[in-house]
Image (spheres, rainbow, N blue to C red):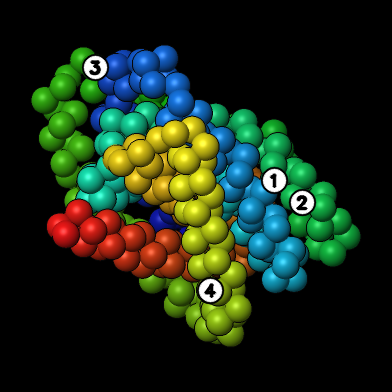
Amino acid sequence: MNTIFIVLPILTLLMFDLGLTLRPHDFQLILQRPLPITAGLVGQIILLPLIAWAVGTYFHLSPLFFLGIMLIACSPGGSSSNVFSMLARGDVALSVTLTACSSIITLFTVPLIMAWATQSVGTATDVHLPVGNLLIQNIVLMAVPILIGLGIGLKWKNAAQGIHNVLRRAAFPALILLATVFFIQHRATIMQEFPSLGLCISILILTVMGGGALLSHLFRLKGAERRTIVIEVGMQNAAQAITVACSPLVFDNEEIAIPAIIYALMMNVILLIYVAVVKAKSEK
C-alpha cells in the first residue's frame, strides 16, 4: 500500500479541522499579545530548523535522514499541540493562533528551507526538490482546506462544531493507522536505524523545548504562556512532513519520511511526560 494515499486525506482533514476551529478573534491575538506570538513563531520558524541542522550534522546523519530531520523541523506546528496545551494547563487561545500562523507562514518557508537543505547535501543524493510543486501542493493541501473550514465555521457554527467533534476523535486513530502501515513497509530500516535516529530525534525535541523555554524567558513570558510556547515549538506536524517526503510531486522518497514517523512517536512520549510533570508540580 502506498502511504501517500493514507497521509493525503489525513493531512487534508487535519487542516480542514483546524479551519473549523478558527475565528477572526484568534488572529486578533497577533496585535493584542505580540510578545508570545513572536516568541512562538521565532521558535518554530527560525530556531527549530537551526537546531535540527546542528543536531543532524552532529549525528552525521545520512543525506536522506538529514533531509527528513530538516523537513519535520520546518513543518508547521500540528493541531494536536492545542490538545497538549489544554492538558498542560497552557494558553489554548495562544496555541490555536500559533498553529494557524505557522500553518500559513510555512506554506512559503518550507520550500525555501528545504531547497537550501537539499542543496547542502549536494551530490551525496540524487534527490531533487521541485520548489514550485511543493509550494502548489502546500497551498492545495493546507491553505485551501483551512479556508474552507474557516468559511464553514463562520457560516454554520453548530455544524462546524459537530464536524470538529467527529474529526477530533478520528485524527489520532488515523495517524496510528498511518504509522502502522509505514512501520510494516519499512520495519527493517526503522528497526536498524531506531537506536541512533531515535536518540537524535529525542535530543532534537528536548533541545527545541528547552529553546522554547529560553525564548519564553527572554520575552518575559510565564505560566500558561511559557508552557504553550514550549509545546508549540516542540510539536510539529508529522503528517505534513510525511506528505512532502512521499508525494510523487515533490521528493517521492519514503525513506525521507522515516524520521517523521519516529518523531511522531518520540514527540508524543516526551510531551506526555512533560504534561505529567507540569500537572504534578501544579498539584504540590
Q: Which residue is mark 2?
A: 118
Q: CA distance from mark 1 to mark 4?
A: 22 Å
Question: Alpha-carbon neighbours of circle 1 within 10 Å: few (<14), some, or many (≥20)?
Answer: many
In screen coordinates, is 242 left or right of 159?
right
Q: Earlier in the sequence, mark 1 or mark 4?
A: 1
Instruction: Say above or below: 221 vs 7.
Output: above
Q: Earlier in the sequence, mark 4 or mark 2?
A: 2
Q: Is residue 126 visible?
A: yes
Circle 4 — which element? helix
Q: Amino acid at mark 3?
A: Leu
Q: CA distance from mark 1 to mark 3?
A: 34 Å
Q: Amino acid at mark 4?
A: Gly
Q: Which residue is mark 3?
A: 154
Residue 78 image point, x, y percent = 41, 45
- Quarter of the figure with residue 280: bottom left
For the residues labelled 1 and 3, say whether their Cβ atoms are less than 8 Å apart: no
The nearer-to-camera label among 1 and 4 is 4
Q: Which mark is residue 198?
A: 4
Residue 217 image point, x, y percent = 47, 41
For the residues labelled 2 and 3, say whether their Cβ atoms are less than 8 Å apart: no
Q: Amino acid at mark 1?
A: Met
Q: Residue at x 51, y 41 (%)?
A: 215
- Quarter of the figure with residue 12: top left
Q: Amino acid at mark 2?
A: Thr
For the residues labelled 2 and 1, say whether their Cβ atoms are less than 8 Å apart: yes
Instruction: Say above or below: 26 vs 258.
Output: above
Q: CA distance from mark 2 to mark 3?
A: 40 Å
